[in-house]
Image (spheres, rainbow, N blue to C red):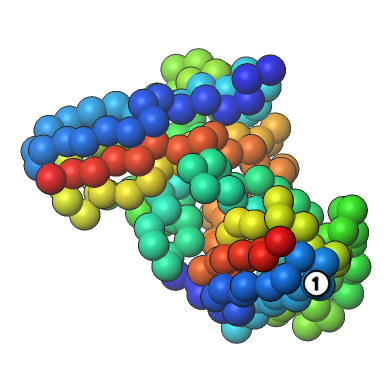
Amino acid sequence: GQQLNQSPQSMFIQEGEDVSMNCTSSSIFNTWLWYKQDPGEGPVLLIALYKAGELTSNGRLTAQFGITRKDSFLNISASIPSDVGIYFCAVAHLNAGNMLTFGGGTRLMVKP
Amino acid sequence: NAGVTQTPKFQVLKTGQSMTLQCAQDMNHEYMSWYRQDPGMGLRLIHYSVGAGITDQGEVPNGYNVSRSTTEDFPLRLLSAAPSQTSVYFCASSYSIIDNEQFFGPGTRLTVL
């Protein structure tokens, strides 16, 4: 199946620091999504990107859809303890039942 | 709204047993899907449905059956459980197949011995 390479795999940061993670693919996609998963819960959609070059914010979160349509990054500014969790990038395959392909995830840990 | 609900939360089966994982949504969503999540592999689509009476296979459908008799419910059946089906199963729904805002349930953690 399609591979999404997400990095870093994990991050351990101090509260208040900014965080950056990214996702790359060898194929072009028209939709990039970022999800967060808390322990014991399902993923929750944070940001959806539909246009190459698009920069979208949701509170302290900012995500960009790469101009080549093969990558995306997610930034979290001024991290707080509740940012802890696993962040996944995902792409949507409209011609395959809108199947979402997920990256391997970035585990974020925040030290108060 | 309860959103997407899944039962049970945890389940242990012996190899060869069958069971049904329940999923329900109260948002009147047409599109529902089942994913499994395995360590280091993200989530993979098992089956999906674009409306009552219509289902189709996803990326990893073998060993699983689904049906969609109502808009609200989308059960996943394991006919003869195998250890390779040990995983966390998530049900998701969205307004339509082209709506990328899919809402996920809390998951069912299944262990097959």
Query: Residue at horizontal 62%, vertical 65%?
Result: A108
**Residue A76 visible (yes or no):** no
**Residue A40 visible (yes or no):** yes
Please, what is the three-letter code of the amino acid marked with disc 1? Answer: Glu
Label 1: few (<14), some (14–19) or many (≥20) C-alpha neighbours in 10 Å: few
| Chain at tag 1 | A
Residue carrying label 1: A17
Q: Splitting the image into 4 quarters, where does residue A65 fall?
A: bottom right
Query: Residue at horizontal 39%, vertical 36%?
Result: B108
SS for callout 1? loop
Q: Is residue A54 left or right of residue B99?
A: right
Measured as percent of width and height from the top left, residue A60 is found at 87, 58
Measured as percent of width and height from the top left, residue B64 is found at 29, 40
Q: Is residue A96 left or right of residue B102?
A: left
Q: Is residue B10 above or below residue B69?
A: below
> Depth check: B99 or A33 in front?
A33
Image quadrant in which the N terminus of chain B is located: top right
Q: Is residue A27 left or right of residue A17?
A: left
Query: Residue at horizontal 51%, vertical 36%?
Result: B106
Q: Is residue B10 above or below residue A80?
A: above
Q: Splitting the image into 4 quarters, where does residue A33 fall?
A: bottom right
Outermost residue, front direction?
A: A112
Image quadrant in which the C terminus of chain B is located: top left
Measured as percent of width and height from the top left, residue A55 is found at 90, 68
Query: Residue at horizontal 61%, vertical 79%?
Result: A7
